[in-house]
Amino acid sequence: MNILVTGGTGYVGSHTTIELLNKNYNVIIVDNLSNSNEKVIERIKEITNRHVKFYAIDLLNEEDLNQVFINHKIDAVMHFAGYKAVGESVKLPLKYYTNNLVSTLNLCKVMERFNVYKLIFSSSATVYGKPASFPIKEDFPTNATNPYGRSKLMIEGILSDLSNSNKNWKIVSLRYFNPVGAHESGKIGEDPNGIPNNLMPFLTQVAIGKLPELKVFGNDYPTKDGTGVRDYIHVVDLAKGHIKALEKIDALDNYEVFNLGTGRGYSVLEVIEAFQKATGMQVKYKFVDRRPGDIPVSYADATKALKILNWKANKDIFDMCIDSWNWQQNNPNGYN
Ligand code: WQD
């Protein structure tokens, strides 16, 4: 089977491509390289000894995308391409809505034109906003609190409507909690542009000496140690969740949503402690004010994915820390 992976040179897209190749799928990647590096294609080949067909195109260009569907018989699509920095989305909402929504609309139009109706969409736990209780279930109210999260929620609504309009569609939205870690080879990993927004890449850059110290955003949250709690999930476990969704997609409803998390929350201080224990590295940090827009706690109820997709996360916080550190040590400047 031929799987089209949009955003396939990105962090989650590249790890999912590895798992697809490991399961003997053929992979075609389209990516505009706006937030990733073409070197990933070579690294994927080094890891799997398999070629992927790569097109450096933008989903905003429908004609270029159309040509890919002419060149290849696509059986299913995994859609990762999209801007994903929460802070930037607040400053540049039009950039986020235009890119994330129009890319998806173009993709769905071209898919329909070529009778390709299997779609797995990269969504985010951000759609839950500030949940009233925990763990978070898929039927909880959604309430995005920033343009990035709202764009994800809007796309979920579009995909739901699409699946209602034509029963050929089989669409799955996977709501990621906090992806961290890297492939055990250390050849691919998270490579943020500039100063990392997310905890783990910032932490590994402090450990390797690229950044002086970690700022812990608030230690006065209503949590066990006052720091924010999140459901960190190893990116390889996350990738495997996509394979399970693909394998089960024919048996699912026309539109389904799944949380992909571990069901376990860790505070920032617990992550720092786990990282130091797992790697033997010391991480300098200090407490600063809360980051605007942060919620105190977020962690998943992942039982629906276990029940229906027969998927659950296996890697623990130490695996996540060790693999993140291995990637950082092997690639002090990411792919550059
Ligand atoms: C985790 C915890 C911070 C950095 C966001 C998006 C989500 C997904 C993942 C795109 C929080 C604390 C962080 C730092 C810190 N992105 N922190 N110092 O905000 O839970 O989720 O990224 O798909 O959609 O919303 O992740 O890693 O930024 O923060 O103290 O330098 O670490 O306050 O408690 P977040 P994060």
Image: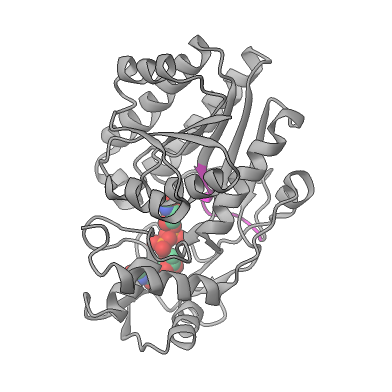
Residue 226 colored magenta?
A: no
Image coordinates for residue 138, horizontal then vertical, percent:
67, 45
Residue that appears at 39% across and 45% down? 146
Placement of 44 over or under 224, stated as above or below: above
Q: Is residue 279 left or right of residue 312?
A: left
Name which residue lies at 60% across and 72% down.
316
Compared to residue 44, the image places residue 178 above or below, namely: below
Q: Which residues are magenta?
A: 123-134
Quarter of the image for residue 326 reads: bottom left
Left or right placement of residue 69 versus residue 112 in this view: left
Magenta-span inclusion, residue 133 = yes
- Tell which of 119 and 223 is nearer to you: 119
Q: Where does residue 298 sit, x and y in percent of width and height? A: 56, 61
Dividing the image into four quarters, tell me where ligand 1 lies: bottom left
Q: Specify the farthest residue to the top.
A: 113
Q: Front-most of 265 and 252?
A: 252
106 to 296, vertically: above or below = above
Task: Decide which of 220, 32 is in the foreground and name it.
Answer: 32
Determine whether 35 is above or below 231 in the image: above
* Image quadrant occupied by the C terminus: bottom left
Position of residue 114 measured from the top left corner of the image (x, y, whole percent): 51, 12
Residue 54 shows in the view: yes
